[in-house]
């Protein structure tokens, strides 16, 4: 991921809340299902979930 996009995600006001959702396994099922379809591993799905969730908010 390019550096400017990572900075944009980290500076998003909901970034910490979305990370907490993933850690506590309290996430949006539809968004996680899409992330799982697009990824190969659980950790990739979790990272993609954060990106998708922040893009949708």
Image: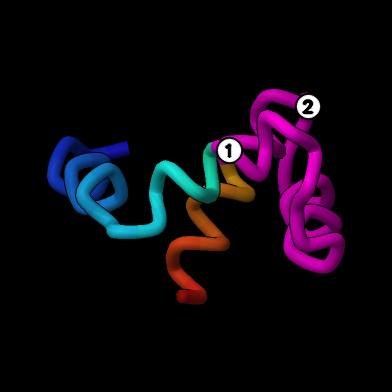
Disc 2 element:
helix
Tell me where residue 2 sits by quadrant: top left
Disc 1 element:
helix
Above or below, 3 against 57 in this view is above
34 vs 13, nearest the viewer: 13
Other-residue count near label 2 (Cα within 10 Å), few / some / many at <14 / 14–19 / ≥20: few
- Of circles 2 and 1, which is in front? 1
- Which corner quadrant holds the N terminus? top left
Above or below, 21 against 40 in this view is below
Among the two numbered marks 2 and 1 on one chain, the one whose residue lies closer to the N terminus: 1
At 23% from the left and 49% from the top, the residue drawn is 5
Percent across and percent down for residue 33 are: 85, 57
Residue range of the region highlighted in magenta in the rendering = 20-47
Tell me where residue 45 sits by quadrant: top right
21 vs 3, nearest the viewer: 21
The residue to which callout 1 is attached is: 20
Percent across and percent down for residue 13 are: 29, 59
**Residue at the bottom extreme, as displayed:** 57
Above or below, 57 against 5 in this view is below
At 13% from the left and 46% from the top, the residue drawn is 4
Percent across and percent down for residue 8 are: 21, 52
The residue to which callout 2 is attached is: 42
Q: Is residue 26 magenta?
A: yes
């Amino acid at each position: 991921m390019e550096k400017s996009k990572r900075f944009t995600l980290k500076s998003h006001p909901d970034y910490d809340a979305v990370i907490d959702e993933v850690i506590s396994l309290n996430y949006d099922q539809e968004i996680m299902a899409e992330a799982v379809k697009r990824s190969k591993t659980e950790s990739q799905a979790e990272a993609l979930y954060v990106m998708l969730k922040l893009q949708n908010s």
